[in-house]
């Protein structure tokens, strides 16, 4: 209901802004035609009405952007609330069951395992929000050091397999760089966050048939390229740039049931920029899967980025 009302507000402001700009242009041209012999008046009139029309257009654009931004913020709050409330409710239920009932040792162990999983989910959500705030800060102290990016990716793949209970063939890792050539200059913790977000996203949006392929290769002599490809729900080509915006989630009928904060890829892009690299996505459309690429500059022999 709230989204529908905001869309109506967007259309209303858009029509109003375009209409007022059209009226200003029409009045301006009419005035110019009536006073075309008065050179100075015509010149001043053109500037005056042009300024009015420009102001109306800019004001309309600003209002529409603010409405969309508020809508994204509300979606983010709803998503975070769900991500926090669900595991908390689950943990509470298990604790009440343990308190009120005499359960067997095997069931008790299973409850403990599930509660640990829920606390891990809570921690990941909180970390995502905190890292999104840090990523939005332009001035942060650099803690970059030379590290083997190929080993870091391998560790992240192993962690993702355990976290999502995946067999090795469900999440594969293809290393296409030689030993010693996969070194980058960066912050290990931030890069682990970026790679982990890419893997979690790929698994989450794969649906029931998980088939994620990770490949690290040399984009050129100066850059390493990590690609994470899934065969899941896919993204409309027009949305491949927007998915890296803060709070943005693709309005896809295939992803309406998938929960998330809309921060994962924003964090990936922010970390890539901090390291002098970039992040982008490719998809043939809905149901065609998605490939997200993280490109980073290699470390040179003198300890600087290429």
Image (cartoon, rainbow, N blue to C red):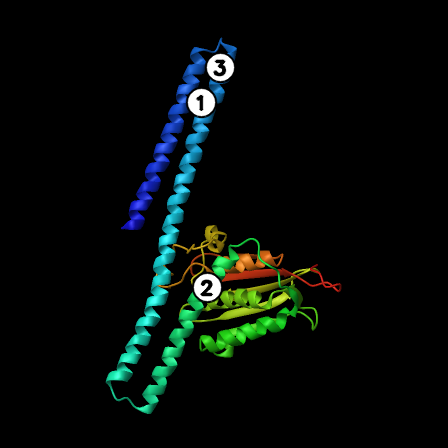
Residue under the point 62% across and 73% down: 151
Q: Residue 239, relative to residue 113: is it above or below?
A: above
Mark 3, Cα crowd under 10 Å, few <14 / some 14-19 / many 20+, is some
| Labels 2 & 3 near each other (Cβ < 8 A) | no
CA distance separating discs 1 and 2: 48 Å
Quarter of the image with the C terminus in it = bottom right
Q: Which mark is residue 42?
A: 3
Of the residues under marks 2 and 3, which one precedes in the sequence? 3
Real-space Cα separation, disc 1 to disc 3, in angstroms: 10 Å
Q: Which mark is residue 49?
A: 1
Q: Which one is in front, 175 or 80?
A: 80
Q: Are marks 1 and 2 in contact (CB under 8 Å)?
A: no
SS for callout 2: helix
Q: Residue furthest right?
A: 302
Q: Looking at the picture, how far across and down is residue 104, in whole percent?
A: 30, 91
Task: Assess whether mark 3 and mark 1 are in contact (beta carbons under 8 angstroms).
Answer: no
Residue beneath label 2, please? 128
- The image quarter containing residue 11 is top left
């Amino acid at each position: 209901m709230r989204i529908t009302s905001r869309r109506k507000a967007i259309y209303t402001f858009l029509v109003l802004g375009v209409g007022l700009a059209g009226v200003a242009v029409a009045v301006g041209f009419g005035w110019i035609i009536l006073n075309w012999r008065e050179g100075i008046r015509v010149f001043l009139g053109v500037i005056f009405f042009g300024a009015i029309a420009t102001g109306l257009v800019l004001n309309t654009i600003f209002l529409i952007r603010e409405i969309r931004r508020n809508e994204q913020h509300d979606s983010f709050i709803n998503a975070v609330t769900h991500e926090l409330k669900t595991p908390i409710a689950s943990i509470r239920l298990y604790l009440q069951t343990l308190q009120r009932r005499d359960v067997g040792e095997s069931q008790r162990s299973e409850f403990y395992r599930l509660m640990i999983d829920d606390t891990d989910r809570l921690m990941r959500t909180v970390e995502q929000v905190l890292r999104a705030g840090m990523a939005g800060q332009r001035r942060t102290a650099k803690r970059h050091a030379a590290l083997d990016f190929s080993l870091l990716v391998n560790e992240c793949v192993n962690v993702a397999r355990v976290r999502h209970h995946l067999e090795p063939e469900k999440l594969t890792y293809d290393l296409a760089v030689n030993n010693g050539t996969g070194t980058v200059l960066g912050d290990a913790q931030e890069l682990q966050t970026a790679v982990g977000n890419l893997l979690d996203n790929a698994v989450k949006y794969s649906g029931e048939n998980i088939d994620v392929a990770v490949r690290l290769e040399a984009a050129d002599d100066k850059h390493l390229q990590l690609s994470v490809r899934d065969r899941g729900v896919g993204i409309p080509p027009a949305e491949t740039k927007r998915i890296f915006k803060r709070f943005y989630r693709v309005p896809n009928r295939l992803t309406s049931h998938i929960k998330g904060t809309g921060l994962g890829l924003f964090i990936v892009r922010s970390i890539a920029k901090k390291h002098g690299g970039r992040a982008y996505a490719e998809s043939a459309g809905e149901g065609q899967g998605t490939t997200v690429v993280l490109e980073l500059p290699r470390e040179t022999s003198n300890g600087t980025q290429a």
